Amino acid sequence: MNLILSIIYLILTFTLTVLCYKYFGKTGLFIWICILIVMANIQTIKISDFFGFSLSLGNIVYAGIFLSTDILNQKYGKKSAETSVKLSFIVMIAFTLLMYIFLYFIPNAYDTSQGSLATIFSIMPRIAIASLLAYFTSQFIDINIFDKLKQKYNKIWLSNNASTIIGQTIDTIIFVSVAFIGTLPFNEVIEIIITMLVIKFVIAIADTPFMYLANSIKKVKEIE
């Protein structure tokens, strides 16, 4: 069941990414990336099992960000892709900070939401720092690799897959290392990294048809 749902969820995420580009252009992708980064940080706390391995569900929507920045890079250039990362980085910090402060409001006697909200949004500083550092670093590496490969080879499948796989590798290593080294046995940290990378590589390859679909769209409606 989890596998079927993950495939549907992934296809839907990539489809919505292409539609945001088609109907709202660059601005649509900027907004979509901000939505995805917030969703990924909320969804990352839910763990499901796939073939006996545990996987954070935030990885699925997170892949949509890499597809979005690659579309921006391909259609509008490196600068636009970098701007989207800076904007979403600020949004992620603002969202995390505001929700953390929000939890300190004292609920009344009839409130039933505080416990659930605290479970979701009480993000440990170490996890938050790991997430921010991994995201910012991996995205800029992904963007620069995509741009260099685009300039040298001009092959979408190469630029898209190589940049995403390298970017996701760096993202995973930074996040898991900062978040868990010292709190989990080292061999378990390595196992988490390997499992996440296998899943992310499969997802990275799966976004290639959607990258070609986005690139084939000639008439894009830009928001003025």
Image: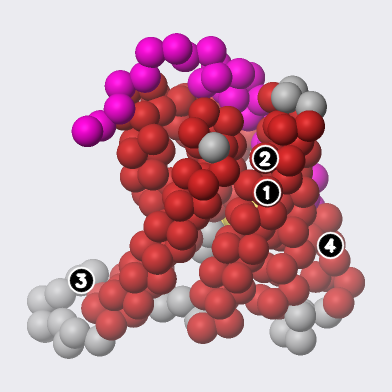
Instruction: Specify the quadrant that holds the N terminus.
Output: top right
Amino acid marked by disc 3: Thr
**For the residues bearing labels 2 and 3, Cβ distance under 8 angstroms:** no
Q: CA distance from mark 1 to mark 3?
A: 47 Å
- Please report the residue visible at 37 percent of the width from the left and 19 percent of the height from the top: 220
- Determine the secondary structure under disc 2: helix
Quadrant of the rendered structure where residue 155 is?
top right
**For the residues bearing labels 1 and 2, Cβ distance under 8 angstroms:** yes
Callout in the foreground (1, 3): 1
Q: Residues within 10 Å of mark 2 (few under 14, many from 20)?
A: many
Left/right placement of residue 18 relative to residue 49 reads: left
Q: Which residue is mark 4?
A: 191
- Determine the secondary structure under disc 1: helix
Q: Main secondary structure of the magenta part?
A: helix
Q: Which residue is mark 1?
A: 144
- The magenta-colored residue range is 195-224
Number of the label disc, if any, that sits on residue 112: 3
Q: Toward the viewer: 7 or 79?
A: 79
Quadrant of the rendered structure where residue 6 is?
top right
Left/right placement of residue 223 relative to residue 11 reads: left
- Disc on the earlier residue, 4 or 2: 2
Q: CA distance from mark 1 to mark 2?
A: 5 Å
Q: Provide residue 109's location: percent of width, then percent of height.
A: 11, 83
Number of the label disc, if any, that sits on residue 147: 2
Amino acid marked by disc 1: Asn
